[in-house]
Image (cartoon, grey):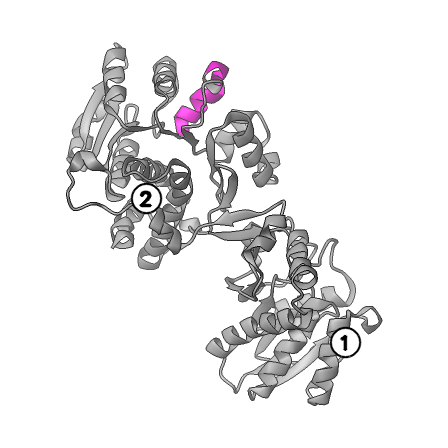
Amino acid sequence: MEYIVSGSDIKKVDEYAIKRLGIPSMVLMERAALSVVDLILCNEPKDKKIIVVSGVGNNGADGVAIARILSLKGYDVTIYVCGVRSSASPEFLAQLEIAKKLKINIVREMVHADVIVDAIFGVGVSRNVIGIQGKAIRLINKSRATVYSVDLPSGINADTAEVMGVAVKADYTVTIGCHKIGTAMYPGADYCGEVCVGDIGYPIDAYDKCKNAAKYVDNYDLSLIPNRPNYSYKGSFGKVLIIAGNEEMSGAAAMSGMAAYRVGAGLVRLFTAQENKEVIGKLLPEAVVNTYDSEEFDVKSLEASIAWADVIAIGPGLGTGDIQNIMVEKVLDSKKPCVVDADAINTIAKNRNLYKKLHAEVILTPHLGEMSRLIKKDVDEIKNNLFATAKNFHKKQFANLVLKDARTVIASGDDLFVNMTGNNGMATAGSGDVLTGIIVGLLGIGVDFNAAAVLGPYIHGFAGDQAAKRVSKTSLMASDIIEELTTLFK
């Protein structure tokens, strides 16, 4: 698992490496420059003209070092110093002196280039960009050049991901050491293009000093999924109960069930409205289907299904009302590991007695609207404070939270996570139902409870990204995500 930190915290990491460990700042700077150079060497032939637009702080010093290395490798490189040299950092002045001795072209205004390296600000922006730097950013954005930003697109606030008046729209961003909030979250993420993390040798324990650190998972973390033993049977991989699908909502139940099976669940039982039985039997013949009558609800049938299950998901397409109140209450009272989604969340939001029954074996998966109803806060307030919202809810209610947005934030165990997979094509009907099925399926096959809350969104987004490559983001449907799960697990 990798880190996401604020701009102020990465400065503490840098300080720890330099002052506590004694790694010279110029050594870290050289490694940062090389991480950007490596990407440019992979992408850009030597006939491309390159201009490095540098500020006069340490981000600018990185930029000048990049210019030097590229020049020595045979590229036609120009440096445009964008700032007042009287306020320059010692590292910048040292790098500039080296560049002068190598007779690298240094100019006082923008010139045409095929490639632009943006090294104006990095993580150092705390107020709106104006003056010569603002003009430079606008010129960069008007150009047709390929743009590489160093650490962060200039003009993006590293702590909040806000656009500080104007910001560079990069094609590539090489973020140094680890992701920043500004590269991971929106709107900043929209300005980064393709993001690479440049490893410059920060020690892992340096990140322990970061108060605002979050984490994200990558493919290596799929090792948290247990191997399937050869000597096994269907009961070895979990008895999964999914309570979903009011009348005319058979698709939600079926897709959740399909997703649970595709991540390896051994037995899936759907508890759904009786009107859905025939359709679900055709869509998902592998599932056991128990039904309820909305007019004469049989609580004992529900209780029997809950008693049978190892893990439970409740909510997709469920509707709200008296029956749903009973369903949610019975699931929460069982104290079994469960995923609570969609209308089950809306039911809890309407009934504070149910809210009080949330416990540490619950994973809630609300989108912003559902979260707003659940905690009685405005959507915009939640949107602007995703980290704090998730952290505070988890601390008070103990339940794990998967707060769904363009970047899903997960509060699980003692940590905060950001899911870095997925795309806007997944903003489509049924996508959330698939996520619910994936998470409960992972619980069924024995994935650790906290890990399932984090791996579920990652797998869901990864499958969505693969599906988008196959069918396009515009055409992507929830069923495409399920189909790609088979490829992922290959």
Q: Which residues are magenta?
A: 342-353
* Residue at image point 44% right, 26% down: 345
Q: Is residue 139 left or right of residue 222?
A: right
Does residue 108 show up magenta in the picture? no
Image-quadrant location for residue 247: top left
If you read the primary sequence from the N terminus, does the residue marked by circle 1 or circle 2 appear first? 1
Image-quadrant location for residue 132: bottom right
In the picture of the structure, the residue carrying the numbered disc 2 is: 478
Question: Can you tell which of label 1 and label 2 is closer to the viewer?
Answer: 1
Q: Is residue 261 left or right of residue 143?
A: left
Which of the numbered marks, if any, corresponds to residue 135? none
**Most foreground residue, 112 or 423:** 423
Q: Is residue 61 left or right of residue 170?
A: right
Residue 205 position (above or below residue 29): above
The amino acid type of the residue labelled 2 equals Ala
Q: Is residue 297 left or right of residue 99?
A: left
Residue 76, given in percent of the width and then of the height, sits at 60, 87
User: From mark 1 to mark 2, how far is it between C-alphas?
Assistant: 54 Å
Residue 34, given in percent of the width and then of the height, sits at 56, 74
* Residue at image point 78% right, 64% down: 131
The amino acid type of the residue labelled 1 equals Leu
Residue 412, given in percent of the width and then of the height, sits at 47, 37
Secondary structure, mark 1, is helix
Residue 11 position (above or below residue 215): below
* Residue at image point 38% right, 40% down: 452
Q: Is residue 245 visible?
A: yes
Does residue 350 show up magenta in the picture? yes
Residue 276 position (above or below residue 468): above
In the picture of the structure, the residue carrying the numbered disc 1 is: 93
Residue 52 position (above or below residue 264): below
Labels 1 and 2 touching (C-beta < 8 A): no
Residue 375, given in percent of the width and then of the height, sits at 55, 26
